[in-house]
């Protein structure tokens, strides 16, 4: 399968996974929205492209839940941007949700490998 065939268009991102993916990206370092989108694309080997229409509502939702915090800072290009950072509650949720996702993937894999 070629890299182009492996790419998943944004509308095919599994429902309910964006929050988990954002939390994972922010566990690496605090980032502004565009950097989060770029990091997810990089980590997925260009398979995922998260648009602003999905990203920013998810960031707002995560902040309302207390899983991330944000503050205005200057970027490397001296522009103002809102930076997001994982909270301790967000780190706990990331651990629990990651484990739950791993179990789900194993279960689906067992079913799909059944002959």
Image (cartoon, rainbow, N blue to C red):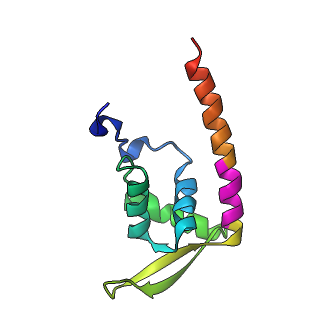
Residue in view at x 65 percent, y 67 percent: 67
Residue in view at x 44 percent, y 65 percent: 36
Q: Where is residue 14 in the image (x, y as percent from the top left)?
A: 50, 42
Tell me which corner region of the image, top left, top right, bottom left or bottom right, holds residue 43: bottom left
Image quadrant where one finds the N terminus:
top left
Image quadrant where one finds the C terminus:
top right
Residue in view at x 34 percent, y 85 percent: 79
Residue in view at x 64 percent, y 50 percent: 98
Can residue 59 be seen from the camera position used here?
Answer: yes
Q: Is residue 114 above or below residue 67?
A: above
Left or right: 81 with respect to 25?
Answer: left
Looking at the rendered structure, the number of numbered marks drawn on it comes to 0
Left or right: 22 with respect to 68?
Answer: left
Tell me which corner region of the image, top left, top right, bottom left or bottom right, holds residue 86: bottom right
| Residue 92 within the magenta-colored segment of the rendering | yes
Q: Is residue 49 above or below residue 31?
A: above
Left or right: 29 with respect to 51?
Answer: right
Q: Position of residue 9 (x, y in %)?
A: 35, 43
Can residue 50 be seen from the camera position used here?
Answer: no
Q: Main secondary structure of the magenta part?
A: helix
Q: Where is residue 93 in the image (x, y as percent from the top left)?
A: 69, 59
Stretch in magenta: 90-98
| Residue 77 within the magenta-colored segment of the rendering | no
């Amino acid at each position: 399968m070629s890299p182009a065939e492996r790419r998943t268009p944004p509308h095919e991102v599994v429902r309910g996974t964006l929050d988990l993916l954002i939390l994972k990206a922010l566990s690496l370092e605090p980032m502004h929205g565009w950097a989060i989108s770029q990091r997810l694309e990089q980590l997925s080997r260009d398979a995922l492209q998260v648009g602003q229409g999905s990203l920013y509502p998810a960031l707002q939702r995560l902040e309302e839940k207390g899983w991330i915090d944000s503050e205005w800072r200057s970027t490397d290009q001296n522009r103002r941007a809102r930076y997001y950072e994982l909270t301790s509650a967000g780190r706990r949720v990331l651990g629990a949700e990651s484990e739950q996702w791993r179990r789900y993937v194993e279960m689906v894999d067992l079913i799909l490998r059944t002959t």
